Amino acid sequence: MSEDKIVITIGRQYGSGGHEVGEVIAKKLGIKFYDVELFRKAAEDLGSDPDKLKRFEERRTNTMSVWGDGDVSFMSMPRKLDLISNDDVLFARESELIEEAAKESCVIVGHCANEVLTNAKIPAAAKVFVYAPVQARIERVMEEYKIPSLEKAEKAVEKMDKTRRSYYQYFTEKRWGGREGYDLMVDSSILGIEKTADLIISFTKKRLGQ
């Protein structure tokens, strides 16, 4: 990787603040930030309304229906993978968008970006996984999403972690949050969002010799 290009991928547990950490990093470095935009662009490219396909974002549905209004079918899409479902179609397009984004400095959150770049032989300056103790994540989810019930927040954290784990392990055949997939794993509850971002930036620059 050229020393003047910085590509950081961030995997994250639900409620750990990984998305916010990525946003802060991108802002501090003055580089592009990608997360839900990847999903929306992929859905639009496939002729579908992103809002109607929200259930596909970083989750598996195993559905095999027609995309868009009948003019674009997953069976007619160019096959970069052995596509068998709508999940595969969307993931294949997202992967292409990730590879395209990584041609320039950027931060990419989620969407198996660490493994997508590895498989495409595109180096990343840092592949990071942000996590936090479950209680800290429950409290953050309750505050951020205005969930008044502790029980509901606990279930939301458990469900989203399960969803992301299934999605990641299906498409990468690796363990979600496993050390083998990342260069740095950081507990965001220790330093908070801002300082966690600073730590990742420092690590990345050190790795690049900057």
Image (spheres, helix red, strand yellow):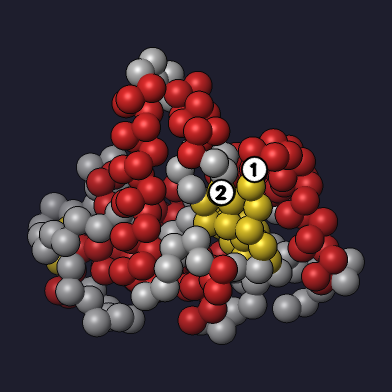
What's the mark number on residue 131? 2
Quick one: label 1, few (<14), some, or many (20+) residues within 10 Å? many
Left or right side of 105 for 158: left
Q: Residue at x 37, y 32 (%)?
A: 154
Q: Residue at x 65, y 52 (%)?
A: 186
What's the mark number on residue 144? none
Q: Secondary structure at mark 1?
A: helix
Q: Amino acid at mark 2?
A: Tyr
Discs 2, 1 touching: Cβ within 8 Å: yes
Q: What percent of the width, then of the height, locates residue 23?
A: 63, 43
The answer to whether residue 111 is above or below residue 157 is: below
Q: Residue at x 77, y 51 (%)?
A: 199
**Residue matched to label 1:** 188
Q: What percent of the width, then of the height, locates residue 182?
A: 59, 68
- Give 69 or 161, whichever is nearer the viewer: 161
Quarter of the image where one finds residue 105: bottom right
Q: Residue furthest right?
A: 210
Q: Amino acid at mark 1?
A: Ser
Q: How many marks?
A: 2
